[in-house]
Image (spheres, rainbow, N blue to C red):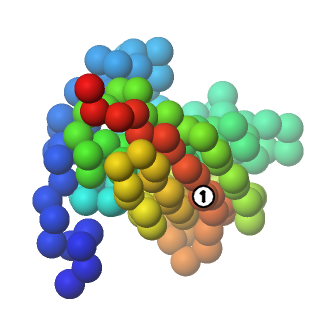
Amino acid sequence: MSDAQTTSPKMTTEAMEAFLEREFPQVFGAGKLYHVEAVGHRFARMRCRYDARQLRPGGTISGPTMMTLADTGLYVAILASIGPVALAVTTNLNINFLKKPAQRDLIAECRLVKLGKRLAVGEVSIWSDGEADELVAHATGTYSIPPER
């Protein structure tokens, strides 16, 4: 079994949702589009609820919507692994848009490939709900974790 399968997360899905609502009410308050579906050690699954306001010309879900989903997913995977550290910050995010997403919810699965004391690196696979066999985007990201005080 891998480390991710044998180590319990530091935060539950419910605790993560409550933390995000408290710390980031502008994104996770009333009418939120981004939802935590599952957390595990070094893992998170997120959902971005479809909303027509996310569309760009041509009828595709916008890049910033998918980038926010990827970035948030990495943040959630990190906090699920180390606990509620609000000041962990993104230092790098790269995304490849692979296919025009369908006009439906987006699902992201995030896995941390490195989790150190000061740095975390992860990858994110994003697909349209119901179409898990074809990714619409793939992202990698790096986060800086503040030192314990």
Residue 90 place in picture, x, y as percent? 55, 38
* Residue to which mark 1 is pinned: 140
Closer to the camera, 17 or 71? 71
* Quarter holding residue 138: bottom right
* Quarter holding residue 140: bottom right
Closer to the camera, 71 or 13? 71
Q: Is residue 56 left or right of residue 1?
A: right
The C terminus, quarter of image = top left
The N terminus, quarter of image = bottom left
Disc 1 crowd, CA 10 A, few/some/many (<14, 14-19, 20+): many
Residue 143 place in picture, x, y as percent? 50, 44
Q: Residue at x 61, y 73 (%)?
A: 134
Q: Looking at the picture, does residue 44 appear above or below residue 82?
A: below
Does residue 133 appear in the picture of this structure? yes
Q: Which residue is drawn at 41% across and 39% down?
A: 145
Residue 133 place in picture, x, y as percent? 55, 77
Q: In this view, does 39 lie to the left or right of 52?
A: left
Q: Which residue is drawn at 50% across and 34% down?
A: 89
Badge 1 marks a residue whose secondary structure is strand
Q: Looking at the picture, does residue 141 appear above or below residue 34?
A: below
